[in-house]
Image (cartoon, rainbow, N blue to C red):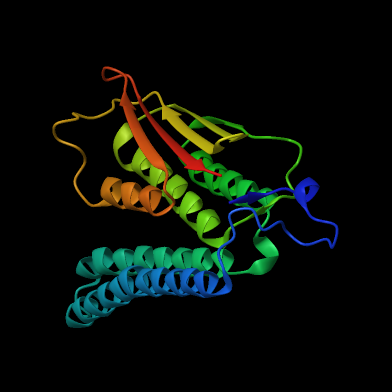
Amino acid sequence: MVVCDACRNRAGHAPLFGAPLPAGRLLELERVRTRIATDLHDDIGASLSQISILSEVARRRAGDVDALQKPLAEIAGASRELLASMSDIVWSINPQRDRLRDLLQRMRRFATDVFSARNIEFQFHAPAEDLEGKLDPDMRRQVFLIFKESVNNILRHADCTQVEIRFAVEKAGLMLSVRDNGKGFDAAQPPAGNGLASMRQRAASLNGSLEITLNGGQGTRVTLRVPA
């Protein structure tokens, strides 16, 4: 739910539009905690297991310098991914980062870091005003993770040179669009892995929709809409 400062009541608190009863609020907080625990288990647990296995492989190859290069590189990559996951989780539960401005800044920073490293041109279109409205913590987290997975899919599969990102606050809610000019993919044979399924699940958890549009082998557009 998007809460604008202009919509606050006279006491200075966020309005109760759409707010559940206290018992319902407690239930929602418990659901957020469960989702965070799931992410900790799935992302960080899996990364730690991978690091452990690769470390054992490296130990066994300690006498062969050339054979060490691949497992050590994979350990470094898994460690970077683990740090990124930890950073995302800490950011998502930090109440000082619950404004629309914070979400857009993190999205823009992530896009700049990864696309600049690959020499991919990108445009980031987002509102320049009314950025102090607060976002529900779970919405903020899920929207960012959907955006992050969209960007990572581009890096892994698109082979593109340009990306356009649009973020808008509409009367009906939030809209996020990520479009590239890459090679796209066969709709009957989507990329391997659970990235797309995870994105759809995250959108559904927000009562939102995720649409993937293929442009005849000339790019892909991912559009997320989340109701207010």
Identify the residue shown where x is 64% and y is 34%.
126
x and y percent of residue 72 in the render? Answer: 31, 69
Q: Is residue 226 above or below residue 158?
A: below
Residue extending furthest front? 21
x and y percent of residue 177 in the render? Answer: 48, 33
Viewport quadrant of the C terminus: top right
Instruction: Name the image quarter holding residue 179.
Output: top left
x and y percent of residue 31 in the render? Answer: 43, 70
x and y percent of residue 218 in the render? Answer: 32, 19
Identify the residue shown where x is 42% and y is 44%.
208
Please tell me which residue lies in front, 160 or 29.
29
Please tell me which residue lies in front, 161 or 199.
199
200 sits to left or right of 108: left
Identify the residue shown where x is 57% and y is 42%.
112
Instruction: Name the image quarter holding residue 49.
Output: bottom left
Identify the residue shown where x is 77% and y is 62%.
13
155 sits to left or right of 166: left
Residue extending furthest left? 188
How many numbered circles does the render carry?
0
Q: Is residue 97 above or below residue 222?
A: below
Please tell me which residue lies in front, 74 or 186.
186
165 sits to left or right of 151: right
